[in-house]
Image (tube, grey):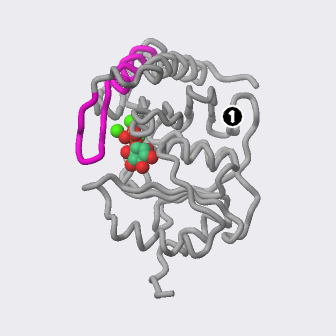
């Protein structure tokens, strides 16, 4: 599989930051950790990985702007391009020794996501996609699952942090979905949730109250694997609105309908 020069820059940056995360994961008990909000942790590992990604991506393409979880917006000279970066998606898993976390890098060109990398260093799984070029796990081309019935489907979800999102709404949605599907999963890394949908490992995924860096790369991966992505109303406000629903065409449509169904006691 031939990668474009820009995707190579992104992959090299992700691998370097991934080595830093892997080292820190081995001695997680020594890391400085602070709280940004209820249940919302940030550690030295997040910041170190972000520093590496910032340096590598800046070196690879001078002048592009950034939107990064820990440093926020960094304006560039080139207003056509922007990196959207989560240096460690799944900090809670990471700090608990659970090897389900990732680095997520998306490149936006004129407001459109054109390239994506999601890397889980603990499993050495590298997901890549370019607009119009398909989605890959390492060298293998990805395709969303072919299941069409919710009753056969395994669906991923996310539980909003305390104080962020609305737990009452989440419980209503969960109750609706639980009654229809084969199984529910909560991986703890929204970027990997979307990568797993792209890989056909999960048939669908929904979450609310997310940030652009959680989903930007994953949106392109799912689409390039033949899947559908929208916000929870079926629109395209995923980056700013924070809600996302993903799956193959049938599961995506069924999931939106199920999430919004008024709850009837059973
Ligand atoms: C979190 C993960 C998690 C999602 C949270 C996010 P972080 O990102 O994506 O799966 O449920 O809402 O904040 O903080 O670990 O980068
Ligand atoms: Ca975080
Ligand atoms: Ca995140
Ligand atoms: Ca993060």
Quadrant for the N terminus in the image: top right
Q: Write down the quadrant of residue 32 in the picture.
A: top left
Q: Which residue is mark 1?
A: 137
Report the span colored magenta. 33-56
Q: Write down the quadrant of residue 51 in the picture.
A: top left
Asked whether the viewer can see residue 134, the reply is yes
Furthest residue toward front? 29
Image point 45% across, 15% down: which residue? 56
Image point 29% across, 33% down: which residue? 72
Residue 30 image position (x, y, % from top left): 34, 20
> Is 51 colored magenta in this rendering?
yes
Q: Which of these two is toward me, 175 or 148?
A: 175
Residue 127 image position (x, y, % from top left): 62, 33
| Ligand 2: image quarter | top left
Query: In the rendered view, would you say 116 is above or below 186?
Result: above
Q: Which of these two is toward me, 146 or 266?
A: 266
């Amino acid at each position: 599989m031939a990668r474009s020069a820009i995707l190579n820059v992104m992959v090299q940056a992700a691998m370097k930051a991934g080595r830093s995360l892997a080292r820190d994961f081995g001695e997680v008990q020594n890391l400085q950790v602070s709280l940004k909000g209820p249940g919302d942790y940030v550690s030295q590992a997040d910041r170190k990985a972000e520093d590496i990604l910032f340096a590598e991506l800046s070196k690879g393409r001078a002048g592009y702007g950034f939107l990064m979880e820990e440093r926020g917006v960094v304006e560039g000279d080139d207003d056509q391009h922007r990196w959207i970066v989560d240096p460690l998606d799944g900090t809670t898993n990471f700090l608990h020794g659970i090897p389900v976390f990732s680095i997520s890098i998306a490149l936006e060109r004129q407001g459109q996501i054109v390239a994506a990398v999601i890397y889980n260093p603990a499993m050495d799984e590298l997901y890549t996609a370019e607009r119009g070029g398909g989605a890959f796990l390492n060298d293998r081309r990805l395709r969303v699952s072919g299941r069409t019935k919710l009753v056969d489907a395994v669906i991923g979800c996310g539980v909003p942090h305390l104080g962020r999102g609305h737990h009452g709404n989440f419980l209503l949605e969960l109750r609706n979905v639980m009654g229809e599907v084969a199984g529910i999963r909560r991986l703890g890394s929204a970027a990997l949730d979307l990568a797993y949908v792209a890989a056909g490992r999960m048939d669908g995924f929904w979450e609310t109250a997310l940030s652009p860096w959680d989903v930007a790369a994953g949106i392109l991966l799912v689409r390039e694997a033949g899947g559908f992505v929208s916000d929870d109303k079926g629109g395209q406000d995923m980056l700013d609105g924070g809600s996302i629903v993903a799956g193959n065409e049938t599961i995506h449509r069924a999931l939106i309908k199920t999430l919004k169904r008024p709850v009837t006691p059973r």
